Amino acid sequence: MIFRSGYIMVRAINLLAAILILCMLAMPVLGDDALKRELVEQTSKINLPVLARYQELDLMRKQILITLQTLSPDQVTESTRKWVNIASGPNGILQKFDGINDLASKDDPHSHEEALTRATGLKNDINALEGYPQAKENFIAFYPKTALSHFFTDQGEYFERLADSENDTRLAIDYYEHALSAYREAEDITKTTYLDLKVKELRSEYQFDMEIANESLAVGETKFNQSLYGLNHSGNFISVATGILSARTSKRELSTVYKIYQKHGDERASEIGEKLAEIDCIHAELVDLFLKYAAVSVTVFIVMLVCVLGLLFRWTHAVEDTLLGNEVIR
């Protein structure tokens, strides 16, 4: 009887152990206080300059801490670690945002362009954060999304100011396009509509002016070479005369190019200005040569005219003498 009771007890213990093992296998892996403390400590230590620049990110950090504190140890799992790392880990949103803010703090348009590119990529991290229920339910992703919108607005204003003060139209268009992109990311419909129209108008005007400049430049360069040819063949009166006309045409066409380049702040304006000065010198030399040719021609003409008049005068006297002799004979 005692043996039977012991047997039953052993069976009961074995059955209970089996049930406990099955329960343990069926239960999800739970977190513990150590992981919770680790994540809280990791987030608490964050003290980045960007937190002062964009207060939404500091609120995000505080919201992460509040969320972790309100979670019971069994709710802090590896999934919790993942979303906390996305938000405030060594390569998380806060760290990336700080790097972006550092680039945007420099007085260099290229740094701001790089900051815009990185900020656009940061949206993927924010979207990933929303994929975790704990983060989504506690609105963790709301704060960096708002901060990112403010960042894009700041960059839109930066590039718009840069474009407004830029003399080079090509650069101004480039800056306006960056501003347009930033405002579009910030979902600022008013600024997006305004700058979209401004960019289209400015680009259209620039392209129209450049077409005129390119045509005038082609003609001006051709006539410039013809004027040089006339100067290099100064022994040919026709070449000199053609060179003068070519120089005048070249100056007219290149002056048009110069005005357009100046209007759009094109650095090539100085090069055209130098060529215009050279054309003036060529034209002056050609005119001097032409005047010399003219003087020689006039001198030759006068000499020939005097000779002809002299011959005509002598012929007239000879005819008169002949007629007088005939009258005497009669």
Image (cartoon, rainbow, N blue to C red):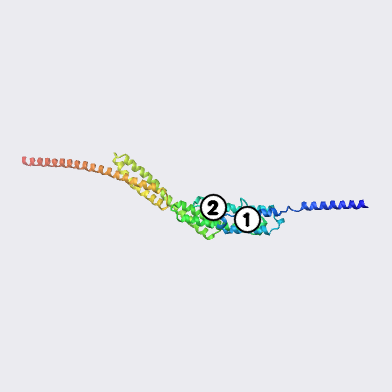
Number of numbered labels in the structure image: 2
Residue at 55% over, 53% down = 101
- Observer able to see residue 330: no
- How far is the residue under mark 1 from the one under mark 2? 21 Å
Please say if the residues under marks 1 and 2 sit with CB atoms less than 8 Å apart: no
Which quadrant would the C terminus be assigned to in this image?
top left
The quarter of the picture where residue 39 lies is bottom right
Front: mark 1 or 2 = 1
Q: Which residue is denoted by mark 2 in the rendering? A: 102
Q: Residues within 10 Å of mark 2 (few under 14, many from 20)?
A: some
For this orientation, the residue located farthest to the right is 1
**Mark 1 secondary-structure assignment:** helix
Residue 129's quadrant in the figure? bottom right
Left or right: 245 as drawn, with respect to 4: left
- In the rendered image, the vertical position of residue 254 relative to residue 194, given as above or below: above
Q: Position of residue 156 (x, y in %)?
A: 52, 56
For marks 1 and 2 on the same chain, the one whose residue lies earlier in the sequence: 1
Q: Is residue 151 visible?
A: yes
Residue 70, position as x, y percentages in the image: 68, 59
Q: Nearer the viewer, residue 150 or 55?
A: 55
Apparent side of residue 121 relative to residue 315 in the rendered image (left or right): right
Considering depth in this image, is 63 or 324 the residue closer to the camera? 63
Instruction: Give the crowd class for mark 1: few <14, some 14-19, many >=20 residues within 10 Å.
Output: some
Picture coordinates of residue 106, whole percent (x, y): 51, 52
**Residue bearing mark 1:** 44
Q: Image quarter for residue 57?
A: bottom right
Percent of width and height locating residue 197: 49, 57
Q: Secondary structure at mark 2?
A: helix
**Residue type at numbered disc 1:** Ser
* Amino acid carrying mark 2 in the image: Asp
